[in-house]
Image (cartoon, rainbow, N blue to C red):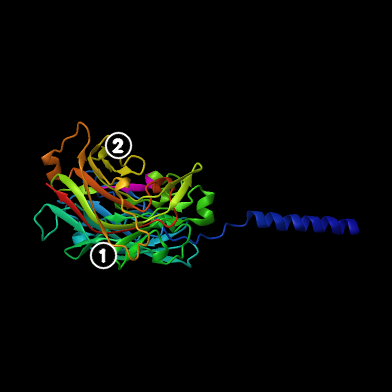
Amino acid sequence: MKKLYKIFFVSLTFSLLLSACIQDEPLGIEADILEVTIPDLSADVQYGATTIKPNRGNNRINIWVSDDYAVGLLSPEFVLTRGATIYPLSGTTLDFSNEQEQKYTVTSECGSWEREYTVVVRPRFVLTADEDGDGRTRTFSFENFQEFEGNFHFHEFYEESSGRKDFIWDSGNLGFALTNTNAPAESYPTFSTSAGKIGSAVQLVTRSTGAFGAMVGMPIASGNLFLGSFNVSQALSAPLQATQFGVPFVMGEPLRLEFWYKFQGGNFTVNGVEQPDFPHIYAVLFEPEVIDGETVLLNGANVLTAANIISAAELDPSQVIRSDNIEIAEFSHGSIPFVLREGKTIDAQKLANGDYYITIVFASSYRGQFFEGFAGSTLIVDEVTLITR
């Protein structure tokens, strides 16, 4: 009898274990849009990638089209996180004319989580001269910023014209959010400060990324701000490719970049050698490649070395004025000329067509893209003026 009982007990235990092993997976809790495509738009109408992959945590999706394209009824299609659903349904035809914002709600598989996305189809942004200027300059004062439209609290900077917000500036803040999702805006590497040359300015601080950053070989995050976009999906696997530099440009030939700045930095050690940290400030004019109908921008690996660069301006680190106390220091004026690359010329017709792109980059650590720098290096930049012929 005891033997039969033992056999029954072992059989029951095995059955329970087997049942536990084959039970269904927990229902998904993510409610994200992973990809957006619009079959109605051909590659020669849509600018950038035809398959848009929104950054995780970003609730705003801009889709750029050519200036002369008459936007109307479109039927976006979505790829979602596992088991999630979207309303309106993927493929639903909606009116996107006149930059109408269409709202989509994504619900997780488990039904407990929702996220609302805003999708807008807009004429591509083109950098032009100041509306009230002489047609030769464009000034960036960094007065316009807002908290990120998503799960985190960092600042986003934008330009405004005719009541429209153009988020042409980006930073690596979304990548830093991976190390501290609840950080306040002023704890990120890039944020707005009221202590500008005139009004507000952008403040860039090289931050320690803590234990997580050290584990993945990225011990610091340089504060940065640039014309272009940051793709957080590549932040860990291919960090240099995560930064996509450049916006279309229709002004005259760039002559120089002027700005006001303050910098305070320290020393850091690389391969046993101690060296001072400096900011990195530069601008690049280039003609992007077009591969399979898609515009290929510069990235962190080639932004100063690519063969398709036309001209560039770069601040010499030896000319940087360092402050012992940035809070009481006076602003210094910087002016760096654009220099044509060897064998390059500027085509006036391409300028007029917006075939050239430009980026302007500010970073609190000179080698920040390689995760080298002094944690605490601080750069404040304001009243940036791009001067053209």
Occupied quadrant, residue 95: bottom left
Q: Position of residue 132 (x, y in %)?
A: 10, 61
Residue 54 highlighted magenta (yes or no): no
Q: Position of residue 387 (x, y in %)?
A: 16, 50
Camera-side residue: 176 or 383? Answer: 383
Camera-side residue: 67 or 306? Answer: 306
- Quadrant in which the N terminus appears: bottom right
> Tag 2: residue type?
Ala
Q: Which residue is mark 2?
A: 306
Q: Which portion, as a residue range, is magenta?
A: 241-246
**Residue 113 falls left or right of residue 156:** right
Q: Which residue is mark 1?
A: 144
Q: Residue at x 45, y 65 (%)?
A: 183
**Residue 15 falls left or right of residue 37:** right
Residue 244 highlighted magenta (yes or no): yes
Q: Residue at x 20, y 31 (%)?
A: 343
Task: Report crowding for label 2: few under 14, some 14 to 19, many 20 or more residues within 10 A (C-alpha).
Answer: few
Disc 1 versus disc 2: distance between alpha carbons? Answer: 32 Å
Residue lying farthest to the top in this orientation = 343
Task: Report crowding for label 1: few under 14, some 14 to 19, many 20 or more residues within 10 A (C-alpha).
Answer: some
**Disc count in the image?**
2
Q: Position of residue 246 (x, y in %)?
A: 26, 47
Say if mark 1 contacts mark 2, CB within 8 Å.
Answer: no
Camera-side residue: 387 or 20? Answer: 387
Does label 1 or label 2 sit earlier along the sequence? 1
> Tag 1: residue type?
Asn
